[in-house]
Amino acid sequence: MMTNINAVCTLDVSKENETYNLSENSQMVNLKVAAVRWQLPSRSRLEARIIVLRFIFSIIVKKIPRFKLWCVVGDSVWQSDTRIIRHKKLFKRLKERGVEISHAAHFLEELVESDGKLKLFGAAQLSELSIESVVSLMEEESCSYLIAVPEEFEIHALICRGWNTSELIDTRLLREIVESNGLVLKMVGAFDDPESGFVGIGKPEMVKVLVA
């Protein structure tokens, strides 16, 4: 099935294209952003996304081996500031709901406070064995992304700042990753789309490497 993966790309997401579009007020001024969309026709969106992400993981290992793939996930709404929330944090609460990332190399968690409320953010460094579980998590959690970043990227600083839920992509997070020469991966394929997969967004030089 891997040979059926369709890859389309654009070297400028600010222009009309069939890969991915960012609005003009997306805070990406003075930063050229490209995108590649990998997708697969399938009756099962979950199955298609797992196959596509395995393919992407293999590309990252082969073409940018010093990069690490992380899943970053956070609360989409503010939580009450209670001892239970502070104790369980994020990943323990997700696990209680049956949502868990398996075979991760590292987990990081931090809380963000505002007006007496809390949001929890976390990051899990993924291995190839994490792929099925992380796709299942991303289908449940709207405030989640995959990021491929250099080893020296400050992932802890990212989760300390947090990010917002967005129908597209949180532009502050996107800008930070792109400026760090990384790649943001977001799931694509609505319930009525014939194809599902992931879109990867980064600098044109990064996209060229991945599709070469």
Image: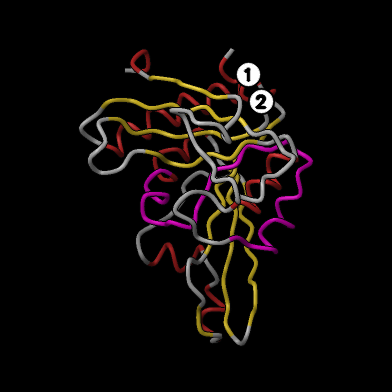
Report the span colored magenta.
135-163
Residue visible at 51% across and 43% down?
Answer: 103
Q: Where is residue 83? Give x, y as percent.
A: 55, 86
Position in image of residue 43 (x %, y %): 20, 32
What residue sits 54% from the left and 33% below the top?
200
- Which residue corresponds to the image point at 53% horizontal and 39% vertical from the top-left? 185
Q: Are marks 2 and 1 in contact (CB under 8 Å)?
A: yes
Q: Is residue 123 above or below residue 9?
A: below
Residue at image location 22% in from the left, 40% down from the top = 192
Which amino acid type corresponds to the residue marked 2 in the rendered image? Pro
Number of marks in picture: 2
Q: Tell me if 56 is positioned left or right of 45 in this view.
A: right
Tell me which corner region of the image, top left, top right, bottom left or bottom right, holds residue 134: top left
Q: Which residue is mark 1?
A: 208
Amino acid type, callout 1: Lys
Marks 2 and 1, how far apart in space? 6 Å
Specify the quadrant of the image occupied by residue 152. top right
139 or 109, which is in the foreground? 139
Disc 2 element: helix
Q: Which mark is residue 204?
A: 2
- The front one of 202 and 154 is 202
